[in-house]
């Protein structure tokens, strides 16, 4: 593999490969059960993004035993277990260490057909880009820390972050797509940039079509922006051009670091609408076409506004 | 002479600088406010917040990487 992929793939036979990944997070919400669900969904996501089927998992826990009640850990693990059951993944064990800062996640092992591995590269000119979850979780979590976001905003992001990318992955595999990655810490444009960096293709993103949590824009205007967003934006400055008329806060949200974000799928134009319909039917209701792959922008991304 | 109010956010991490500035401009309504910040994130967030609330923003670099942001309305 030439670029860093979402998970590692090790071929066993002509039609069977192992897929392995590990991920863990510091708490993103106050509720321990929800945190456990989100961390597990986030860890499983890398397997789904590559078109694999997760089979087993191990817990990874860093817990401040001296200062925090063990009942909190129990709830976190129950949240994680609930998601593993939903994913039909067997928990095989785990490892915990005493640490001042709480962290939780999973190492996940699954299987994948060696010829059906979905990589970040391999998007083709004319493809449509589909995003399966709204963005803005980083901004809303920052505002929650400042107590400037309400319960409704918190509920929106918890529901989205704890949703497995399983259905989205199964639907895209059923239809057949060219490339896929999941949206996490680098934000939508950071992960999109990974798909075109150093290639002969580029992307046009339609800013106004990107699904965004309704509260995120106003909170961004209030300065509730995590430092990671500015780092993501600065890192990709030379690859990304924000077109005239794109709202400044919206442009920022496109770089917002996500936790357990959706899949970014590159699919041929003739299959795109069918894929959107099937995703909506499967309950992935926020999925939307957010852009296209073009041959005229080599290794670059242009963000356009409809206005 | 009116005394200029100062919000010192040095040493505080995101989102506190923007939060404290927001409280201060809500209390002040108009006039001049000085905000001291010491990170790039705080600098961007405080000026973003103030501009969107209709305040004029000027920045003055200070020694040791900190910055004095003057807000006027």
Image (cartoon, coloured by chain):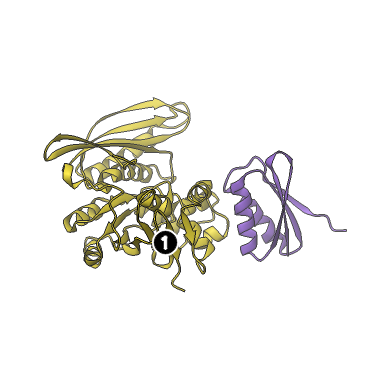
Q: Residue at x 49, y 65 (%)?
A: A243
Instruction: Look at the picture and state if A4 lies above or below A144.
Output: above
In the rendered image of this protein, does residue A164 appear above or below residue A220? above
Q: Colour of chain A?
A: yellow
Residue A250 at what x, y percent from top left? 49, 62
Give residue A194's position: percent from left, percent from top.
38, 48
Q: At x 53% / y 59%, what residue is drawn?
A: A219
Inspect this view and state whether residue A149 appears.
yes
Q: Quadrant of residue A291?
A: bottom left
Asked if residue A47 lies left or right of residue A201, the reply is: left
Classify residue A100 as left or right of residue A130: right
Task: Compare residues A193 and A45 and report the one nearer the observer.
Answer: A193
Identify which residue, A162 or A254, lies in the foreground.
A254
Across and down, in percent, residue A35 comes to 38, 43
- Looking at the image, can residue A150 be seen? no
Chain shaded purple:
B
What residue is at 30 percent from the left and 60 percent from the top? A125
Q: How many marks?
A: 1
Quadrant of the image containing the N terminus of chain A: top left
Pointer 1 chain: A
Q: Is residue A75 above or below residue A67?
A: below
Crowding near the residue tagged with mark 1, few <14, some 14–19, many ≥20 C-alpha atoms within 10 Å: some
Task: State the residue position of label 1.
Answer: A212
Quarter location, residue A214: bottom left
Where residue B38 sits: x, y (%)? 66, 43
């Amino acid at each position: 593999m030439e670029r860093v992929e979402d998970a590692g793939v090790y071929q066993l036979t002509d039609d069977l490969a192992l897929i392995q990944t590990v991920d863990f997070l510091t708490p993103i919400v106050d509720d321990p059960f929800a945190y456990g669900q989100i961390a597990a969904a986030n860890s499983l996501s890398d397997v789904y993004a590559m078109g694999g089927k997760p089979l087993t998992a191990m817990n990874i826990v860093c817990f401040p035993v001296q200062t925090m009640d063990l009942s909190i850990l129990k709830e976190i693990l129950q949240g994680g277990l609930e998601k593993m059951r939903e994913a039909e993944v067997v928990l095989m064990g785990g490892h915990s260490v005493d640490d001042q800062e709480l962290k939780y996640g999973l190492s996940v092992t699954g299987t994948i057909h060696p010829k059906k591995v979905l990589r970040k590269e391999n998007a083709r000119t004319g493809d449509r880009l589909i995003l399966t979850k709204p963005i803005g979780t980083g901004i809303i979590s920052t505002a929650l820390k400042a107590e400037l976001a309400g319960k409704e905003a918190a509920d929106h992001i918890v529901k989205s972050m704890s949703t497995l990318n399983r259905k989205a992955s199964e639907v895209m595999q059923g239809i057949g797509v060219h490339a896929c990655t999941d949206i996490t810490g680098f934000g939508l444009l950071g992960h999109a940039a990974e798909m075109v960096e150093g290639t002969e293709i580029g992307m046009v993103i339609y800013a106004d079509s990107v699904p965004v949590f309704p509260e995120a824009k106003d909170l961004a205007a209030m300065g509730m922006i995590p430092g990671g967003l500015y780092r993501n934006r600065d890192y990709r400055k030379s690859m990304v051009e924000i077109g005239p008329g794109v709202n400044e806060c919206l442009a920022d949200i496109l770089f917002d670091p996500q936790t357990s974000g959706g899949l970014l799928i590159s699919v041929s134009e003739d299959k795109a609408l069918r894929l959107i319909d099937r995703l909506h039917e499967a309950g992935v209701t926020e999925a939307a076409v957010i852009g296209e792959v073009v041959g005229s922008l080599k290794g670059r991304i242009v963000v356009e506004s409809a206005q | 002479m009116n005394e200029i109010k100062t919000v010192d956010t040095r040493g505080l991490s995101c989102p506190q600088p923007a939060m404290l500035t927001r409280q201060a401009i809500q209390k002040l309504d108009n006039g001049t406010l000085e905000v001291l910040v010491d990170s790039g994130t705080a600098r961007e967030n405080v000026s973003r917040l103030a501009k969107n609330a209709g305040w004029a923003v000027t920045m003055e670099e200070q020694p040791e990487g900190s910055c004095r942001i003057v807000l006027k309305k």
